Structures are given as structure tokens and as C-alpha cells.
Image (cartoon, coloured by chain):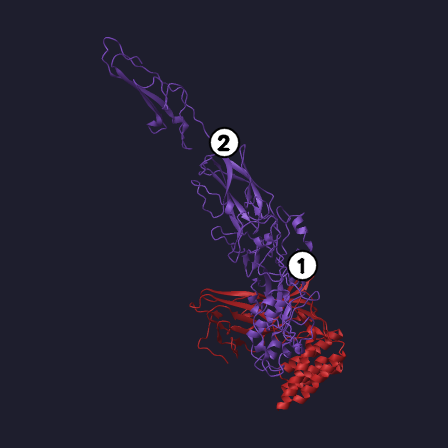
Amino acid sequence: MALFGNDTAQITVSLEYDLGGGWTPWPGESYTWTDDSPSCGGGGGITCVDHVAQLSLDPTQDITVIKVRATMTVQLTHCDNCYIRTSNAAGTVSVYDVRVIVERPTLRLFLDADNNFNPESPEDDQPQYVPGNDLASGYPVAIPASGTLIQTVKVIAAYVLSNNKIVRPPTGVENVAMTLENTSIYSGIAMNFTPGFSGDLAMPQSVVSFDIDHTARNDLEVRDYAAWGEVRAAAGSDQAPTMRVPRDDNTNGIPDVGWRAADGTVVPDAFADPWEDGDAAPSGDGTPGDGLGAIEEYRGFRVNGALRRLDPGRKDLFVYSTHPQSIGDAHSLDLNFQLLQTGEMDLATRIINPDYGNAGNGPGAAPNPGRALRDDAAFQRGLYVIDGGDSGNGVVGKTPRAIPGMVVPNDVSGPIEIFTTTIRKVSPDDNNGTDVDPFDEGKNNQTLAHEIGHGVFIAHWRKQVSNPAVDCPDAGPLQPDRAPTIMISCWLQMTTDINDPRWNNIPHVYDTTDKNQLRIKKVY
Amino acid sequence: MLTSAIKATAILFVAAATYAGSEVAVFLQPRDYLAPQYMKKPGGDADYVYVVGERIRINVELWNRGERPVRVDTSRAAQAGLVRLVLLRKEAGGYVEVPSSVAREGEPSLRTPVQTLPGTWGDVLELPFKGSLAIPLEIDSDALATPGIYLLRVSQIPLTCEGDCQIKNQAGEYRFEIRSASAVSEQIESLTRRAYHAIERSRVAEAEAAIAQLLKVHPSSVVARQFEGDLAESQRQWARAEAAYASALRILERGDDRLLAEPRDHGDGRRRYLSDRQKAARASGRRQ
């Protein structure tokens, strides 16, 4: 630029692009020099030296139509000497390289557990997914008919950019090969529900084609409420990162998201040891646990026809009672009672977690150090309560014991018998051994609670030291003065008036001393 | 007898549409069952034990666990009309169904929280909240002549109810053992039960004969003396009852009844029971 006298000039340079829709100014890529500008100043996109301008393109941009141009205008804006001395202004600009740099998309997997996957805004359900659960409610889906699937979810493969945009697969890539590896093979589909399957997860298709929305979708069959496995996918030379279903970074078999127990408690996965059994409430005699590991409480049990995941913070007691009064007044024990119906517990063994075995991978698989530590206590037993009819000897309830002394469910040797006919004979109104009274629900409820109390380590209420004369003959030291409770024994000796309807004097509740004896887990 | 203005026709079990949220649970319960006095209790596969030839009596009970009343039409309740039962016998490979029949035995009874009412077949009975219907049935099968482990199971509940009403098979299994009558303890048990059932049904002559036969076979039977007391008490013969209970108590305390299955069962419960009955008979005699 050579200017004389008062002459002025201006040079303007700008970049434009055309992505197929017409020329568009390139934002920030325009600069104007005037006579008082530094001859080659900075401050703009376009300067006097080589310059690289960048523009982000839509992933769907057709690169064959891209055009870029530079435009320069040179103007002598004031020129006194144009005829005497020649002022002039000139410049050169060129676009000498147009490069389209394409980000290489990566193959990845998504889990769609609620059938609402949107390729425009892809969301992965894997972090929140719990096998066998309804994603929205957080509770298990209904137990399927025997031999059928619990649920089917989708595994979706797609090529994505770093901004989570799904893009078309690379040219020539039309299919994805998917494999399932390291799946669990638990016995049954829940802790007390057989039969199971040869694998807890399954994919019916090993090769899936990309669809028009650039996704390749495969069914993932879920066959266990604690199913566990790894999905791998490959397309062309690309390998997707392995997706573990459910997400389980610490591989303890429990989803990282935790689970929602049937009582509504949200249980985080904070279990370094999946067999941890530390149920704290109710505290009872101070023995934590209920004989069930965290992973068992997570996997869940068939209870009253539905799958229930449990709260590992609260002790559970499983009871199958053939009594219409179920467990009677035992509800006040404040345990999480799991009341079973026909077919939910083997009555010969009363084992409530028979299906803990895992022939595949994941927790419980052999060798299983966690389980081996407690092999002798691998099974937890429930209580089984029947109507014994008439005892014939005045006994109204009986908890059979495999060992002397107080017992936990594992040491109860058979069904607890409630002799309802005997109760009807000896309870009011007639209070004698021959006249059978109307069915007395209240007395059945008391007897049920009394015997169930024995089944969880609660001893008889004994007579006080202050009144030893009327003590029961059956073992145990006399206890300090204390009001009678539902665990009372020898009620026939409680009154000298043989016609007093003595049942009416028996409480329907346990007291603190009773509750402080409670224990469910066998201590070895 | 309970009667109802509503006589049902096609629907066995009727719950009006307004009875939303009802649940009826089905149970199988023993009826007239005396726990073993002389023979051993059944093992883990059975809860009840009978001697070959004994009648297997059960109750099918329908319990209303909903908050609203429901109505049960018993007009088609003959045999398996309300529930269908199958009898299975344990074989080497598992349980196998064996032919059986179910017969109604007596009238149904309706229990409410405050009373038990007799019903009549054909009635439409309304089950109130916590109410139940007990249907007495007797199981018959030639297969029961063979000792073994048996399972009576509710196979189907062909009941329907309208609205939000569920029928649930809550405890629809009855596990029992049939024992041969060849062993002495089983023979004595059989006689014991015969006497028991006669007393329960107030058949005095039959009861006396059965007790006499029991004493003939097993003269030191505590249970026979106890039953003598029970029978006398039921006839308000207090002195005779007191003497019988005292006799039973003496036999028990001396340990003379060596065949008794569990002589000191449950904290010496029988001794306390006999003692209590003796006192009761004495007290009643004094008041008389």
C-alpha cells in the first residue's frame, strides 16, 4: 500500500463458505485494513500470515458440496494525488487448502430397558438398570410362569461421536456381531424359585443389522432377577467397549445403582462382600443378620406370589403358615415377615434360599470363597406352622427343637404345631376340656405368636422371684418381677379359680425383655 | 340354617361389583385330627399320620381377607365344586397322582369373628370381613390302603368373583402319611382315635366300647383313662371323671404306660393337663 498526501485507502478481506445452501460469511473471518492500520496488524482472523480457520460441521454434512472462498476489496477512499503521484493499494489473499477433518465415531452399546430409545437423543439405561426390575418404578416385574422369561430388554449398538451423536456406520459396515460372555447361571430365577435356565442372560441373535436409524438392536433375555453378564459387540474392525449388565464396576454381583427393597427402602450398593449379613434391626439379642447375604436379599424371593427384594438392614423371617390367622400376634415383633404361600418353601427342609448356587460367573460361582466361609450356614430356614388338630394332652402349641434350649429357625426341627382344637376346648367360654367352644381367633393369634417367638430364640416368660410358689416346672431360672407377656408359660397354674377364663389374662404382646432375646441367624 | 334370598345359578362364587378389593384365601385344614399319642410323629415329608383304614377328613376353608363381604354360592359345591383336589403318592421318582374321590361330609359352617353358624348346602353364604366358610370333606381312595406318603393338593379353584377380587391358594397342600396297622403302636393308636372320635361326636356307647377295647389291648393306657375322664365329664359325672383323671395321672407318674410316644412331652404338659382336669372335675362335683 503506497499512499501520498492525504490519500486514504481500505482493504477488506473476508472468508465465506457454502455447505450446499449458499454462501455464508464465515463468522470472525473478516478484516479491514485502513491507512492508519498497521501494515500487517493482527487482531483479526485473517491477517498477513498463514491462517487456519475452523468450522464445526454437522455430522450429516455432505462433504462433496463444501466450498470456501476468500473475497478482497481494495478501495482508495481519498485520493488527491491519483493523477500526479500515484497512490495505490493492493493486496493478495488466497484459499490454498480446504480440509474436511472427520471425527472417527466409535462403536458403543446402549441398554434400553424401557423400550423408549431415541436415536436423536440416545440414553443408556445400563447405569440405572436392575435385572428383572421395571425401570420406572424400581420394583421387580411379575414372576413369570415357570420356564418363561422374566423380561426382555434391548441391547443397541451404534456409532457415536464424542458429543453422543449417533452417526451412520462406516461405509461397508452393515452388521454388528454381539456375544454374551461370563453370564451368571444361578440355580432358579430367584432364591426360592426353580427351575432356572442354562444362562441368566441370552441374546437370540448373534448378528444384528444396522437399521435406517443407524442402530443395531438385539433382544437381551433376562432369565434371573440377579442376572449378570457381559455383552460384547464388534462391527468391521471396531470393537465396542464391553457392557456389563447390570453396571457393576466392583463386580460384586449387585448393581452399582443398588436396589429398592419391597418395603420401599432404597439400598445402595455399599457391599465389599456380597455375602455380608449385617441386618441390624430389630437389634434383638444383638446378633446381627438374618442368615441371608446382601446378594441374596438383592436377588429376591418369591413371597406370596411376587418377587420381593429385601432390605439388608432389617431382619427378615420367612413363615409359611397354614393357619388363616397366619402369624397371629407375632406381627408385633417388628421383623420384616415374609409370609409365604403354597409352593414357596420346601416344607421338608424349610430352606428358603435353596437356589443360591451359581454354575456360571459372578458371585456365588464355584469356587466361591464368600460362600465357603459359611458353608455350614449356607441355608437359612424359615418357620412352618401347621394346625396340629388336638394334642390330646392339653398342649396348645409346640415348637420342635433339634437342640436343647432356645432355638433359631435353623434349629427348629419340624413344623410348629398350633393345636386349634385343643385351644377351642380350653379357651373361654367354657374353659374346660370337653366342651368345644366357638373358634377363638384371639387365642389362636396368641398361641401363634407364642410359638413363633420360640422359633426366634425367645424363651418363656417365667414367674417372678417374688412369687416362686407358682413357678412352672420346666427349666430356667426365676426372673425378676415383670408383667406377664405373650410368652407366658404354665398358664393353667396362673389362677386358683379353675373356672376363671384364664386365657383372658394373657397379654397379646411381647415386652422388651422378650424382644431383646430375638435372634434369627444361627451363630456357629 | 343360614338362608339367603339370593339363590345363585351359574356362578359358583359371586362377589358383587361393589365389593372391590376382596381376597379369598383357600386353606386345607385337618378335621377331627388327634395328634399321635402312641405312634411316632411323621417325618419331614408329612405333617399328619393315619393308620390304614382311618378316614381322612379335612376342611376346605375359604377365608375372606378383603375389607368387604363376598358371597359364596354353595349350590354346586358337591365334592370338588368349589375347589378341585388331587391326591398324590410319593414314589421313587417323585409324587404321582392316584385316583381319588372327595365327598362332602356334613354341612358347611360359616365362621364370623364372633360366632360359628351352620350352613346348608345350596345356600348363598355371605362371608363378612374375616369371615370364613369351612367345607367338610372326606377323601377316599383305594390307594390309601397302601402305606406311604401322600399329598392332597388344591389343583384348581374354579371360583370366580367380580370386581377386584382375587382367589388365592394360600395353603392348599395337605401332607400326610398312611401307616400300616401291623405294628402294636399303630394298632393302639387306631383304637385311641376310634375312642376319641366317638367322644367328640358324643356317641357314648361307642366311646365306652372303644375305650374298653383300648384298655383290653393296652391296660396301662394313660390316654384310655384320660378319655374315661373326658367321657364322664361330658356326662357331668364328676366323681367318675375325677377318679379317671386321677388314675391316668397315677399311671403317668409311675411311668407305667411304656408305649406312650412322648410321656414327658412339652414340659410335662400332659401331667399338668390331667392334674388340672382332675381339679376341675372335683370343683364341679362340689358345686353340684
Residue for badge 1: A523
Chain assignment, label 2:
A
* The colour assigned to chain A within the rendered structure: purple
Q: Is residue A3 above or below residue A482?
A: above
Residue at the image position 53 percent from the left and 67 percent from the top: B25
- In space, the residues marked 2 and 1 are separated at their CA atoms by 64 Å
Q: Which mark is residue A172?
A: 2
Horizontal placement of B2 versus B261: left or right? Answer: left
Q: Quadrant of residue B136?
A: bottom right
- Which quadrant holds the N terminus of chain A? top left
Q: Quadrant of residue A451?
A: bottom right
The kind of residue tagged 1 is: Val
Chain assignment, label 1:
A
The kind of residue tagged 2 is: Gly
Residue A107, image x and y in percent? Answer: 51, 36
Q: Which mark is residue A289?
A: none
Residue at the image position 52 percent from the left and 52 percent from the top: A133
Which numbered disc flags the more N-terminal residue, 2 or 1?
Answer: 2
- Which quadrant holds the C terminus of chain A? bottom right
Horizontal placement of A206 versus A367: left or right? Answer: left
Residue placed most toward the observer, A304 or B164 = A304
- Give a yes or no on whether discs 2 and 1 share a subunit: yes
Residue at the image position 71 percent from the left and 66 percent from the top: A404
Residue A17, image x and y in percent? Answer: 36, 26
| Residue B59 seen in this snapshot | no
- Chain shown red: that is B
Q: Residues within 10 Å of mark 2 (few under 14, many from 20)?
A: few
Residue A350, image x and y in percent? Answer: 64, 62
